[in-house]
Image: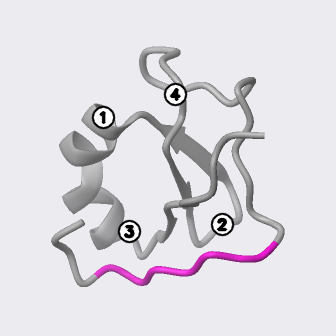
Amino acid sequence: MTTTATSATSATTTLTAANRCDRCSAAAKVIAVLPSGSELHFCRHHFTEHEAGLVKLGATISEPTAELV
């Protein structure tokens, strides 16, 4: 990730094989939490595509690095 976006990975933030990208239904790799509390899941491709907009909105970006559960 090459942005200065707020990054926070909570110990309780995990992705499972059931978590799918909200744009294309591929496996989710990134979680974006909007200031309103809404949570969006993105595959790597779509996160890269929408990263600048998410930063402008003040989203908290989480990229859980642990293996999928």
For marks 2 and 4, the one nearer the N-term is: 4
> Considering the numbered disc 2 on the image, is that residue within a helix, a strand or a loop?
loop
Instruction: Give the residue type that dot 2 points to.
Output: Ser
User: Which of the labelled discs sits on residue 46, or is there none?
Assistant: 1
Q: Which residue is mark 3?
A: 57
Magenta segment includes 60: no
What residue range appears in magenta? Answer: 5-11
Residue count near mark 2 (Cα–Cα under 10 Å), binned few <14, some 14–19, many ≥20? few
Q: What's the distance in space between the residues labelled 1 and 4, CA to CA?
A: 8 Å
Instruction: Determine whether label 1 and label 4 are within 8 Å by CB.
Output: yes
Q: Which residue is mark 4?
A: 21
For marks 1 and 2, the one nearer the N-term is: 2
Q: Which residue is mark 2?
A: 36
| Vertical arrangement, residue 22 with respect to residue 14, above or below | above
User: Which of the labelled discs sits on residue 32, or is there none?
Assistant: none
* Quadrant (top left, top right, bottom left, bottom right) of the C terminus: top right
Q: Residue 44 at what x, y percent from top left?
A: 33, 39
Q: Residue 58 at what x, y percent from top left?
A: 42, 76
Name the foreground residue: 43 vs 68.
68
